[in-house]
Amino acid sequence: MRSICKCLFLLLCFGACAIAAPAKISGAVESKTPFSGDRLFAVLDSVGGTGTWMEWDSSGVKDPSIMSVIAPSMKTSQKPQMVWVISEREKPLMAILFSKGAGEVLVFYELSALDANPEPLKLNLEPDPRVFLRDYRQESPMVFLHLDKPNLKIALSEKLIRFTYDKADKTPLRFDRDFAKKTFVEKRSEVRSYMDYFRYEYALMLRAFVQSVRGLFNWQPWHWYMDSWNYSAFIKPDELESILSRGIPPEYVTIFKTKAATGETVEFRVNGNGFFEMDIFAP
């Protein structure tokens, strides 16, 4: 890996992006030639650690903290080529890829927060397939498989977009047939455990479904994780307790469901045994 650029150099080259902004440059890595895909993501992973980088969508909701950096740079000759954000840290980190001479530079900014106000979910009614399906290959007229994960699939029809991901668990989720007989304290504890499990499953689906396409939703990938954005759509403890009290393992559990402002119903479902599904129903 090439050496990290000096702070003074960064301030000279990119200072216009950071003036009066709730973000600060935390470092950069430059290459005399364009980054290869492998090296680019190796650099991102080395900085992000165990967190997940999420690609910023220029057509999505704009976080002021991000735009304070991106908007000024759009007025210069060094326009951002790609932008990523990682939120699994005390302060979010943003990475922007700029061209620099014959090469490129990846600049990292620490953000004060991801600070967009929650907005209703909307869908782009006419997504560009070249953008939307960039990471997929066509298997049949209406079915697309992910380039790296063929068990991740998108099936299209006139009224439905269905994402599915199938990776069977070694140990299926256990449903206690005697749940209704437990004490109040035991029920509360078990419901909390199931809620944690489904939050983890939800995160897996976001990475598989939402983060594998672009230009489909107005929410940025990180907005889906935020309670202030997803609370009304995410399964509630009392709903889960009602499911468990039946004593019969359900075929599926709907853990996220909402009606988009554009009229579509968006639903995430799991079966507790490694099968995940996101359906987008047209009105």
Image (cartoon, grey):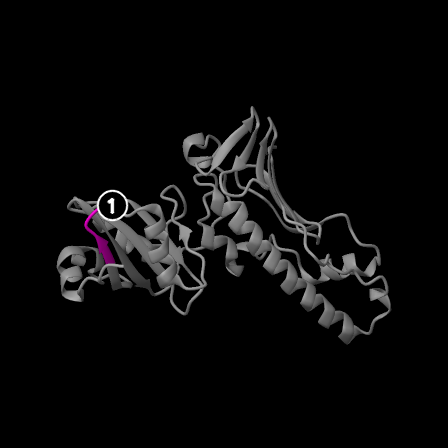
User: Does residue 241 lie above or below 217 as drawn?
Assistant: below
In the visual, does 34 lie left or right of 128?
left
Task: Name the amino acid, label 1.
Answer: Pro
The location of residue 183, given as percent across then percent down, is 82, 74
Tell which of 35 and 188 is nearer to you: 35
Tell which of 92 and 124 is nearer to you: 92
Crowding at mark 1 (Cα within 10 Å: few <14, some 14-19, many 20+): some
For the C terminus, which image quadrant? top right
The location of residue 177, given as percent across then percent down, is 85, 61
Q: Which residues are magenta?
A: 29-33
The location of residue 114, given as percent across then percent down, is 39, 59
User: Does residue 141 lie above or below 58 as drawn?
Assistant: above
Tell which of 278 and 184 is nearer to you: 278
Q: Is residue 118 rendered magenta in the image?
A: no
Total tally of numbered discs in the picture = 1
Tell which of 89 and 229 is nearer to you: 89
Residue at the image point whose x is 51% and y is 46% from the top: 210
Image quadrant in which you'd find residue 14: bottom left
Circle 1: element type: loop
Which residue is farthest top? 141
Residue at the image point whose x is 36% and y is 43% from the top: 58
In the visual, does 40 lie left or right of 258?
left
Residue at the image point whose x is 41% and y is 35% from the top: 131
Majority SS type along the magenta span: strand
The location of residue 217, given as percent across then percent down, is 48, 42
For the N terminus, which image quadrant? bottom left
Residue occupied by mark 1: 34
Residue at the image point whose x is 28% and y is 50% from the top: 97
